[in-house]
Image (cartoon, rainbow, N blue to C red):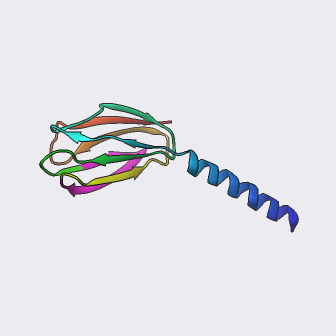
């Protein structure tokens, strides 16, 4: 029984430290572009996508490493994605087809 409790607490510590080690990155949307064209992050990190334009954006990805669609949102709003798997993620805007960026998750 003590061994199971010990394993539980070690697992809890490892999970907690991974959560606290995760970083939040910010990639804005300004002038119909992402504020960075490439970003390298760690598994477990998140990216916040604030809309800084006067019009709506819709950030999404169909990449196997992370599929998501944040829906349309207006200036001043922001939405966040947690990247829980390693790989290359191509991020686009459904409203502005020239908006593209790459997130490499390691």
Question: Residue 26 placed where, x, y %?
Answer: 35, 42
**Residue 100 placement, left or right of 24:** left
Screen quadrant of the N terminus: bottom right
Total number of numbered labels?
Answer: 0
Query: Magenta region, mostly helix, strand or loop?
Result: strand
Q: Nearer the viewer, residue 54 or 41?
A: 54
Residue 29 position by quadrant = top left
Look at the image and say whether residue 95 sits in the magenta stretch.
Answer: no
Q: Which residue lies furthest to the front in this view?
A: 76
Magenta stretch in the rendered image: 59-74
Q: Looking at this view, name the residue that lies furthest to the left.
A: 54
Can you give x and y, in whole percent of width and height, for residue 45 in the image? 48, 45
Magenta residue check for 65: yes
Q: Where is residue 56 in the image (x, y as percent from the top left)?
A: 15, 52
In depth, the one of 76 and 96 nearer the eye is 76
Q: Is residue 11 left or right of residue 75?
A: right
Q: Which residue sits at x=27%, y=35%?
A: 35
């Amino acid at each position: 029984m003590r061994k199971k409790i010990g394993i539980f607490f070690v697992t809890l510590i490892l999970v907690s430290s991974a959560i606290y080690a995760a970083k939040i990155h910010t990639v804005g949307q300004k002038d119909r572009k992402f504020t960075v064209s490439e970003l390298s992050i760690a598994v477990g990190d998140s990216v916040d996508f604030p809309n800084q334009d006067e019009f709506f954006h819709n950030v999404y990805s169909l990449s196997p490493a992370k599929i998501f669609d944040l829906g349309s949102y207006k200036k001043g709003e922001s939405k966040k994605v947690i990247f829980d798997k390693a790989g290359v993620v191509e991020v686009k805007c459904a409203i502005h087809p020239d908006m593209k960026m790459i997130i490499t998750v390691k």
